[in-house]
Structures are given as C-alpha cells and as structure tokens.
Amino acid sequence: MDDESDESVLENKDPAFIGAIFSNVTEFLQLYGWFIVIALAAVYFFYSRIQPWLYRASQRREENSYKKLDVGVAQSRLEAMEKARQKMQAELDEQAKVFAEQLKIKEEKKRQENIEDWERHLQGKGYKSKTKAVS
C-alpha cells in the first residue's frame, strides 16, 4: 500500500490553465503562422534597409554636437556664411545696377518720344502719333 501512495505522489499532473494556454498558442500559430512569418520577414527587410540611414543620421548628430563645441569649426562656419552673404549681396547689387540702367534707358527713350511728339505738334503734324512704332 505504501507503493501506491508513492506512485500518486510521483505522478506529474499539469494544471489545466497551462494546457489551455498551450492549446490556444498552438491554435493561434496554426491559424496565423504564415502571416507572422511574412510580417517578421518584412520587418527584417525594412530594418535592414533603414539601418544604414539611421547609422548615418546618428553619426551626423554626433558630429554636429562636436562642431557646436569646437570654436575653430564654428568660426570657420560663420566666416563661410558671411562670405556667401557678401557674394549674394554683390550679385544683387549688380542686378540692381543693370535694372537701373535699363530703367534709365527706357525713361530717356520715353523723353525723346515726348520731345518728338511735341515737335510734330509744333509743326502741325499732330500731337501724338496714331501709329505704333515697330521695334
């Protein structure tokens, strides 16, 4: 009789909730296993594509933090910005000069036309020309 009590003590009985969890997990994998595999493959593919970009971004961020602290780099960057501003201002000044010259030429041409119109008027040929001049 002692042997029977020892056998009942040594018997391994799984609790019911462990069996239920196991059966639910296996059923879920049977239903959605391929979707999970495809999703994991897609995540890995996109991660492998994005990882170099993330690495470069972190490197740039690290380099920029060093640049902010380095006085020489900051000074050279400011000098380069000032040089670029001066170049852009010189181009703008040149464009303004060209525009002013063109405007002056137009005004002179208009003044000459008015003088010619007034001279025609004094000669009795009419005050304003009714025909347009072909340019």
Image: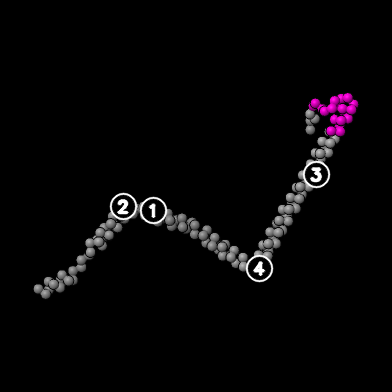
Q: Would you say the residues marked 1 and 4 are in contact, meaning their CB atoms lie under 8 Å apart?
A: no
Mark 1–mark 2 CB contact (< 8 Å): no
Name, please, the residue furthest toward the bottom. Answer: 2
Find the residue positioned furthest to the right: 123
* Coloration of the structure image: one colour
Between 6 and 111, the one nearer to me in the picture: 111
Alpha-carbon distance for marks 1 and 3?
A: 70 Å
Circle 3 packing at 10 Å, graded few (<14), some (14-19), many (20+), is: few
Q: Which residue is mark 3?
A: 101
The residue that label 1 is drawn on is 38
Horizontal side of residue 82 vs 16, given as left or right: right
Q: Which residues are magenta?
A: 114-131
Residue depth check, mark 3 versus mark 2: number of the one nearer the observer: 3
Q: Amino acid at mark 2?
A: Leu
In this figure, which residue is indicated by the disc labeled 2?
31
Lower sequence index among marks 4 and 3 = 4
Is 47 on the left-hand or right-hand side of 14? right
Question: Badge 1: how crowded within 10 Å, few (<14), some, or many (20+)?
Answer: few
Q: Amino acid at mark 1?
A: Ile
Q: How far across and down, in percent of the image, does residue 41 sit?
A: 41, 55
Q: Position of residue 131 (x, y in %)?
A: 79, 26
